[in-house]
Amino acid sequence: MRSNPWRHVRAGDVSRNPYVNPPPAPGMPLGTPAGGTARGASPSTPPAGGPGIPAFSGSYILMDRTSTYALGVHALQEACQREGNNSHPHSIADDGSRIYRPLTFKENIEARVKEYNTDRNNDGSPRTEQERLHLFTRWIDSCMGIAYEKKSTRFTLIPQCEQLITIPELCRDTFLSVPYRSVRGIELDSGARGVTYNDLLSRQKVIDHPAWKAAVGDDALLREYAGIVFSLLQTKYNHDTGMGFFVVQKPNEDQLRALFVNDLDHISNADGNDNLSNYGSFLRVAHRRAP
């Protein structure tokens, strides 16, 4: 009998757990964790920028991993500022300055679909499957907040969360302590009858899942993405379930975390129960200079 390579995710996604995937040893680059493969990647998947995978191919740049979510946000903002990036999404502060933000959960899904469907590189050369799947080789963080109400199964999705966009650079907290009733977004209940959370899903259950639908915000995009992922899961792993939606249930206090989409080896789960102190991995839209 074929063993289930994802049986561990039923107890919660562990791909960002520092005890399972330890941080780099002192002096070692974040892209190469000590004692094993990159977090969220299998031994057969080269790290971003490694042999066989270009550091940049297409319209998006998969940035170097950082040791916390906050450091990743600030690395992204600093890179965009250096470039004078007019392509990456931003908002305007009261003083007229740009505030670059991480991509939303929807924008990350769009990026994966776009890159997977692009069969030519910028120089016109044909793209290999490895290149088309480049953005599937690592989890991608977003600025979508997921706020939890204490002692409850209710949670709220915030597509562009101000507290995450402006998170202090040195923040190493597990989550942000934000009063649940102060947030505005799409409220859902992980205890709702007939809806599965914290477990693997069929393709149709993903398409119909209220949290996946709310997080992506585009039913056609969700159907296309699920079609790509489940086709790959079946082809590569002979598996017909995946894309679970993982959340915190009945926390001891109100809390705010960030929602991310996992890599293909971790079946592209939507994960909202991870700690902000556990690494950061972000996409940057490639800077296009005016001709």
Image (cartoon, rainbow, N blue to C red):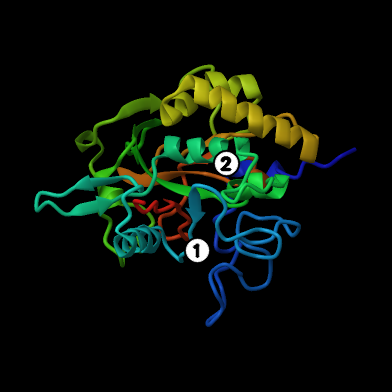
Residue at the spot x=26%, y=37% of the render? 180
Q: Which mark is first along the chain, 2 or 1?
A: 1
Query: Residue 64 shows which numbered tag?
Result: 1
Where does residue 253 sit, x and y in percent of width and height? 31, 45
Occupied quadrant, residue 230? top right
Where does residue 161 sit, x and y in percent of width and height? 29, 42
Q: Nearer the viewer, mark 1 or mark 2?
A: 2
Q: Which residue is mark 2?
A: 115
Crowding near pointer 1: few (<14 within 10 Å), some, many (20+)? some
From where the camera sits, is residue 177 visible? no
14, 158: nearer the viewer: 158
Answer left or right for 48 relative to 110: right
From where the camera sits, is residue 102 visible? yes
Label tally = 2
Residue at the spot x=61%, y=54% of the render? 40
Where does residue 219 sit, x and y in percent of width and height? 48, 20
The secondary structure type at the circle numbered 2 is: helix
